[in-house]
Image (cartoon, grey):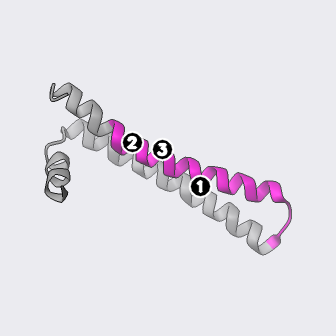
């Protein structure tokens, strides 16, 4: 199973790899913003809405990163007509 996953990533198209990398960078930036908001809430303890915004942004960044990976692999497989 592990070897199959490694093989899938090795056979990705260069454009697909570039899109996945840029998407993961975008998700990392969103995650860093979310963590900064959550740290601000921890130290200032101002309003619960700040906590909710931080959690929602964090969940969104994780969801987008998984979607970039999975959709990149699926689109590359469709492009190569493996599916």
Of the image marks 2 and 1, the number of the one nearer the N terminus: 1
Residue corresponding to mark 3? 64
- The residue at the point 73 percent across, 67 percent down is 40
Which secondary structure class fits the magenta region best?
A: helix
SS for tag 1?
Answer: helix
Asked if labels 2 and 3 touch by Cβ distance under 8 angstroms, the answer is yes
Q: Position of residue 29 (x, y in %)?
A: 52, 54
Q: Is residue 30 left or right of residue 9?
A: right
Q: Residue furthest bottom?
A: 43
SS for tag 2?
Answer: helix
- The residue at the point 42 percent across, 41 percent down is 67
Residue 58 got which mark? 1
Is residue 49 rendered magenta in the image? yes
Q: From which residue to which does the magenta span run?
A: 44-71
Examine the rendered structure and indicate whether residue 8 appears above or below residue 33.
above
Asked if labels 1 and 3 touch by Cβ distance under 8 angstroms, the answer is no
């Amino acid at each position: 199973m592990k070897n199959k996953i490694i093989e899938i990533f090795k056979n990705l198209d260069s454009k697909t790899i570039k899109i996945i990398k840029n998407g993961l960078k975008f998700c990392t930036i969103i995650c860093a913003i979310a963590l900064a908001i959550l740290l601000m809430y921890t130290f200032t303890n101002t309003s619960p809405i700040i906590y909710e915004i931080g959690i929602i942004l964090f969940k969104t960044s994780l969801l987008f990163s998984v979607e970039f990976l999975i959709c990149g692999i699926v689109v590359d497989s469709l492009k190569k007509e493996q599916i």
